[in-house]
Amino acid sequence: MAVVIVTGSAGLIGSETAAFYAESGYQVVGIDNNMRQTFFGAEGSTLWNRSRLIESYRSNYEHYDADIRNANELEPIFARYGQEIVLIVHTAAQPSHDWAAKDPITDFAVNANGTLHLLEATRKYCPGAVFVFTSTNKVYGDAPNRLPLIEKETRWEIDPAHPYQNGIKEDLSVDQNMHSLFGASKLAADILVQEYGRYFGIRTVCFRGGVLSGSRQAGVPLHGFINYLMKCAMTGTPYTIFGYKGKQVRDVIHAHDVVRAIHAVYTHPPAPGEVYNLGGGIYSNISVLEAIHMVEDETGRAINFGYSDQHRSGDHIWYVSSLEKFMQHYPNWSMQYSMKMILEEIYQENKERWSVTP
């Protein structure tokens, strides 16, 4: 049976990927040691999602509580399945700017060293497999902030005469700007994935994601702002906006659409080392202020929010992905989830888990 390895398999994109391939008849091998609880405390734990996968896909899903920082824990897994491995989807990461600044060594070990270990295991045991890495738009650092931006009532927008009017393209420089330590560790991993593709001929792909969202993401203050904002509304937790007047814009893509993109590159791999920006693009983007209003409308509850003038280091004022390159290469792929649909799903599927207060 064809084997798909998914790292970070209990996280948002990882769990959606694992479920998709298990339901499609593949043998799915999940690697996840719940480090999100280490990063974000009990509310960041993904054990509930791991249990759901194990219960739902007993015959097609096998879980390993392995640490990608340790090559000795990965080697036996890859050795066991060897050439049966047809796809590696690497979603495991330390995903927070703020957390990385507190512990840069762990951040780099997870994001960069962990990726290197996975690439080397792929080269050794299954070099014919497709290797998909969920990178981040933070590899561009704060370069997007130098674009000509126009302040509107509820958001920042790019000058409509600029070549990036339909989103930021892959040709934006990753050099000579502030990335945050998280952005730097992810950039190191991103370049490694490209290099293993171009140098060794492994069919590697980097997806530089915008805000990845969906109902199964753990909402925490340092990561996943849409889910955390919804959680704040549902539980009465105060929310803090960090800088830029709350007008900073993010594009948001649903995990379902990300998994469909992953499957597209698996079934028709591009040239080794290919890179794509992948987010909501011009189809699904929102400012923090706009998100607050939409969440309030969806839940019927006012959000108690405060404001801090201090923006996060390396944070973007406006980031909207250009999907032009990916959609040219994969014309059968299109965005299926709108911003409104994403918020509705998060609310409806988390009513019980997040215990809506009266």
Image (cartoon, rainbow, N blue to C red):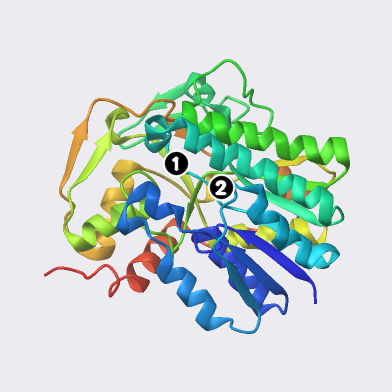
Q: Amino acid at mark 1?
A: Arg
Q: Position of residue 132 (x, y in %)?
A: 70, 51
Q: Residue at x 46, y 31 (%)?
A: 104
**Residue at the disc numbered 1:** 250
Residue 122 or residue 74, whichever sits in front:
74
Quadrant where the image shows the C terminus: bottom left
**Residue at the disc numbered 2:** 279
Task: Report the disc number at residue 331.
Answer: none
Mark 1 residue crowding within 10 angstroms, few (<14) / some (14–19) / many (20+): many
Q: Position of residue 210 (x, y in %)?
A: 52, 44
The answer for how far apart the CA atoms under marks 2 and 1 are is 9 Å
Q: Residue at x 72, y 42 (%)?
A: 325
Q: Position of residue 345 (x, y in %)?
A: 40, 68
Q: Secondary structure at mark 1?
A: strand
Circles 2 and 1, Cβ within 8 Å, touching? The answer is yes
Q: Is residue 322 above or below residue 172?
A: below
Give the number of marks. 2
Q: Is residue 242 above or below residue 82?
A: above
Q: Position of residue 252 (x, y in %)?
A: 48, 50
> Is residue 225 visible in the rendered structure shown here?
no
| Quarter of the view holding residue 168 | top right
